[in-house]
Image (cartoon, grey):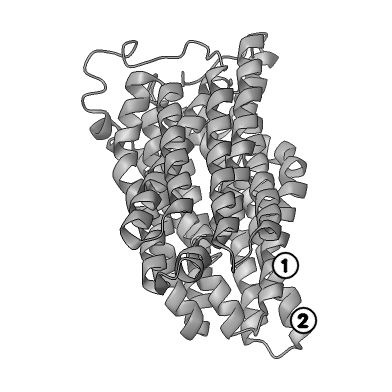
Amino acid sequence: MTRQMGAAMRRIHVGNALSAFGLGFTVPYLYVYVAQVRGLGAMTAGLVLAVFAVAALIVLPFAGRAIVRRGPLPVLLVALVTAAIGALSLGLASNAPTVLLSAAALGAGQAVMQPALATMIVDCSTSETRSRAFAMQFFLQNLGLGVGGLIGGHLVDTTKVSSFTVLFAIEAAMFLLLAVVMVTVRMPHSPQVGDAPAGSTKGSWKQLLGNRAMVQLSVLGFVLFFACYGQFESGLAAYGVEAAGISTSALGTALAANTAMIVVAQFAVLRFVERRRRSRVIAAVGVIWAFAWVVAGYAGLGHGSQEMATAAFVSTYALFGLGEAMLSPTVAPLVADLAPSGMAGQYNSAFALVKQLALAVGPAVGGPMGAALHGPYIVTFFLFSIGITFLALRLGRQLTAVQDHPWRARSRVVAKGGVPVESVAA
């Protein structure tokens, strides 16, 4: 990694922390703000959450092409300004149409930030440093969300609209501050649409869909996000309250345990993950999450004490956090390594689109099941976790040695007296 790439990466990591810190201020309190503080009711609050998902699904297919054509930095700056406008207007909105329009702007901006920042990380890293870079990104995101949520919880007052206006203003300020930081980033030259073979971007989506490994990774990604992230604040939370009798304070403790596990375990597992096949690591996550669902089943369906049920439920979230820490240096670098030269933005956007679809479908399916069908809920998502293991091992057969196990491939080159090289220009 060159000095220029290192300096750019440090600013990108600062930017990730700032954006997560800003999101942490408002995301946990959005429903309460719309439904109760603004008095717009539960239906409008639900529509706001739906608008976030719809806005992301609309803009992400275009974001990938824009990143390929213009580069990730200009696209990121537009997304940040859009998100800042959405956040500030959401804090000032007092009627349903304005709230929904503001949520659409905020949701669209947030959605585009993800692939843009991911592509910047790809452009400023090498195959040797990419896993660690994405691990650092995930670590800072969770730390920022946790700290932001903690501080935001002490600032809000449900009897004062002004306290929420301050929160959204702080979020907008974080986005604008991130834009200022990003303007100072000197991106190294990376392959753009002009560097790629003629006509390669005209059929970029067709080309992506023709990449069997990427298609299989996208299917695997959908199951990952559907069976884990899509359940945290919907189905699993409803199951914990209804089946296990978990209090709201214990639910907060469970979420904190998830974040704490990620923060503590992220770099402890990184060395282990870097030296294993990526497909095997993802398969192991499926096994860990399957065990987590067994523990959740004990919490709600077992006959232990309330203390044991609570401990088991908190442990479930911690086990999910361990799996997340293993995935962060594995999945995102794999997406980058599967992308042809100059197409990392397209592939990152496509994978972000898959993530948004899973996060939209996951709560819709898991919420009602977790609240009412306790046994079938646990069995269903236990089987989904086993499916993750099966899909990961199947994906491994589509990957080259360098894509699946880049550390070993580099070691072999060095052992032969050569110089490690990039397997795929990202």
Can you identify the residue that label 1 sits on?
253
Residue 407 in view, yes or no: yes
Crowding at mark 1 (Cα within 10 Å: few <14, some 14-19, many 20+): some
Q: Residue at x 49, y 42 (%)?
A: 396
**For residue 100, side relative to residue 396 (left or right):** left
Q: Nearer the viewer, residue 396 or 314?
A: 314
Q: Identify which residue is drawn at 54% across, 61% down.
A: 161
Q: Mark 1 and 2 residues: CB-CB less than 8 Å, in contact?
A: no
Q: Nearer the viewer, mark 1 or mark 2?
A: 1
Secondary element type, mark 2: helix
Q: Which residue appears farthest toward the bottom when viewing the image? A: 303
Tell me where residue 313 appears, x and y as whole percent: 68, 73
Q: Is residue 289 above or below residue 72?
A: below
Where is residue 183? Give x, y as percent.
53, 19
> Which sits in the foreground, 118 or 112?
112
How far across and how far down the image is residue 241, in percent?
60, 81
The disc, 1 or 2, on the residue closer to the chain's N-terminal end is: 1
Front residue of 11/86: it is: 86
Mark 2: few/some/many CA within 10 Å (<14, 14-19, 20+): some
User: What residue do we see at 48% from left, 10% from top?
Assistant: 189
Q: Is residue 115 visible?
A: no
Q: Is residue 264 above or below residue 60?
A: below
Please name the residue that numbered disc 2 is placed on.
308
- Quadrant in which the N terminus is drawn: top right
Q: Is residue 416 above or below residue 250?
A: above
Please say if 112 is above or below 150. above
* Kind of residue at badge 2: Met
Q: Is residue 163 left or right of residue 33?
A: right
Q: How many marks?
A: 2
Amino acid type for the residue under numbered disc 1: Thr
Seen at 42% across and 22% down, the residue is 74
Query: Mark number for residue 279?
Result: none
